[in-house]
Image (cartoon, grey):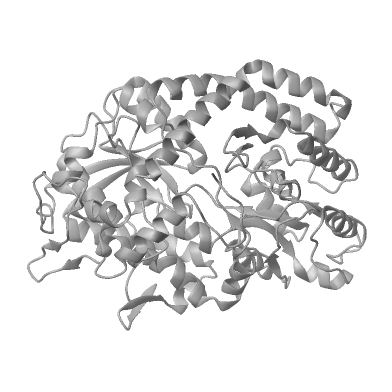
Amino acid sequence: MVKKRKGRHIGFASAVLAAAALAAVGCSSTESEEGKASVTPATSAPNQAKEEYKLPFAEPGTASLRVATADNLYAPKSLTQGLPVWNEIEKRTGVKINWEVVPSAQYTEFINVRLAAGRNLPDIFRLTGSPVKASADGVVIPLDDLIAKHAPNIRKLFADFPAVESQMRAPDGKIYAIQSVNSGANINDPFGWLIRKDWLDKLGLKEPQTLDEWYTVLKAFKEKDPNGNGRQDEIPLSPDYSYQGLGIFGSAFGLHNFVYSNGYFPDKNNKVEYHWIKPETKELVTWFNKLYSEGLIDSQFAVNKVEQIDSGISRNLVGVTNHFVNNVNRYNSMLKQTGVQSDWVITNPPKGPNHEPFYEMGPPLGLAFGISKDAKNPELAMKWLDYIYASEEGARLVTFGIEGQSYKVENGKPQFTDWVSNNPDKLSFNEALRSLGALPTTPWLRMTDGFHAAQPIATLEKDPALAAQVNKVKKYIVDSIPKPHGTQAEVEELARLENDVHTYVGESIVKFITGRTQMTEWDTFVKNTKSMGLDRILQIRQQQLDRYWKASKK
């Protein structure tokens, strides 16, 4: 059962933590003088050939791979420009990467067009849907044999963290994609409500806790001119993720309506429910409608993206938004460049009278990457993935950047430099790293223990003020619902049913919030949602969750 206890991370996260205790000693791979990657193969492939590969994998200029993914999240520096991290990886592996990239918002359409054509696919590409479906469609190949023969660092990762391997395996027992692991980032960079503390201080207000206190604060932000320009132009609350972003307030009612669980969550008997149709959600949405009708929620909340929210923040208009806590520094920097001294902080999660407040962790597994059916050299593709993803050397490059510039090694541990935390070009912490090609849109690991946990820990060590904010809310962080891979039949049926349900629910909730549909129509909304196959959706999700718990106990 997915429990909600202060300071506890159960399910996948605790399985990773338990395994980490066994992996804490001797978990690093080392590079010998001969360039041989020294690793211990995982137990998941005991009878397969064991390989200790040598770097480089090929003579310079003789090997290349085509990799399709979203472009660098720091837009001024495209992956196609030959960034320092990837130049160094090419130097060490001997493999030139031909990037096939588009901006993140365009990637799904970009790769879906390529997959529909079904030919000339890149060697490695980021999946936008189920790896099981990608395999059934014949666009990716199984990775098990390649991992057994050509990925010693991934084998060691699986041996040290069996929960990671278990989550990546499809119901048929095979692995079709390598996925980022975010468990360390989820704990050390929580997602929640961020607020202008300087506005609170100016108006003599305390950080809001209950929904009534939130209303009072947002009302004051709207009416009492905290930005001091003499105009009532403030946008008290500008959430990302539309109505799902507002769903974070569901913490006050014990509702898991944020995008991570999106309303699906097991009750105390481990039975999956759909929170978006619960009576408590009606009460919450009624409150949203009150906020919206009084101009306390951004009028464009349903369509805003990060760019629009950032614009409002940089113009000193927005008082509250939702994001990862590390963005408080970025927001303060944005405003400082306009001459405004701000103090963005993360709040405690909203609380109600009958429920413990919480912020959800994101799913432990993130972006998935497969090797395509058209890969000319799948063995080389797997070696390259193994290096950048699971080797200590490769992982340090993609998480810390370039030694001597973005990090230095002290007492055997990488530590970020002032170039990152106080960048001469006024870049934020993450922007500075991404300008080098680190924190990539390729698969990477941010674990809770071992050398793959070094980056989240080093980030907080470099910024004690940010660490204090993380520690403030860490006890409130809970698991979202696990998302195990489904069978091909489950994936296809859920895609068909959930597309209709989620579209209808999203449109309906927005209409309730904005007043285009009266709250008296709530029962009709619930009835219509149920009639669209909700019981079948819950049945499929239940059998997936039951399978996950059973596998977790092995």
Quadrant assignment for the N terminus: top right
Q: Compared with residue 91, is residue 278 higher up or lower down, i.e. above or below?
A: above
In the figure, is residue 49 to the left or right of 269?
Answer: left
In the figure, is residue 16 to the left or right of 315?
Answer: left
Residue 112 sits in which quadrant? top left
Q: Which residue is rendered at x = 26% and y = 54% of the image?
A: 159
Q: Compared with residue 423, is residue 215 higher up or lower down, i.e. above or below?
A: above
- Residue 386 in percent (x, y) is at 24, 51
Q: Compared with residue 129, is residue 405 higher up or lower down, i.e. above or below?
A: below
- Residue 70 visible in the current orientation: no
Q: Residue furthest top?
A: 531
In the figure, is residue 472 to the left or right of 66?
Answer: right
- Residue 358 in percent (x, y) is at 66, 55
Q: Residue furthest bottom?
A: 411
Residue sitting nearer the eye, 543 or 176: 543
Quadrant assignment for the C terminus: top left
Q: Residue furthest front?
A: 269
- Residue 191 visible in the current orientation: yes
Residue sitting nearer the eye, 32 or 168: 168
- Residue 492 in percent (x, y) is at 45, 20
Residue 547 sits in which quadrant? top left
- Residue 542 in percent (x, y) is at 52, 30
Residue sitting nearer the eye, 31 or 311: 31
Residue 436 sits in which quadrant? bottom left
Q: Which residue is rendered at x = 32% and y = 46% of the image?
A: 165
Residue sitting nearer the eye, 367 or 338: 367
